[in-house]
Image (cartoon, rainbow, N blue to C red):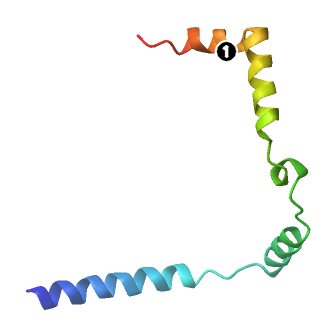
Amino acid sequence: MKVSMIALTFAACVTTVSAFASSPVDANVASSNARQTSQWVPSQAAVHAKTRAEVRQELARAQQDGQLAALNKLYQGS
């Protein structure tokens, strides 16, 4: 019984894999994807991490202009 189930599962997997493998890839799409990935450059914001002083400045600014109070009121729980 187990041998027949394993054989059936294997046959189903082989059939599924061959169905997905039979679709041809368009050469123009593949080459345009390759060109796009080679031109990617990370933004400066992703490279630069904030310092502790910058984070404290943002926190003080958010406290002064009321952003933190508004967020605390919005997410105060039920």
In the rendered image, the residue lying farthest to the left is 1
- Please tell me whether mark 1 sits on a helix, a strand or a loop: helix
* In the image, residue 72 above or below residue 54: above
Question: In percent of the image, x 91 and y 68: which residue is there?
Answer: 39
5 or 41: nearer the viewer:
41
Please give the name of the residue rendered at 79% of the width and 9% of the height, measured from the top-left corner: 65
Query: Relative to residue 11, is residue 32 drawn left or right?
Result: right
- How far across and down, in percent of the image, does residue 62 sit? 75, 17
Q: Residue 30: x, y in percent?
A: 79, 77
Residue 72 left/right relative to 38: left
Residue 22 in picture, x, y percent from top left: 57, 85
Q: Quadrant of the C terminus?
A: top left
Q: Residues within 10 Å of mark 1 (few under 14, many from 20)?
A: some
Q: Is residue 4 above or below residue 23?
A: below
- The kind of residue tagged 1 is Leu
Which residue does the numbered mark 1 point to in the structure image?
68
Answer left or right for 61 relative to 75. Answer: right
* Location of residue 36 in the rendering, given as x and y in whole percent from the top left corner: 87, 68
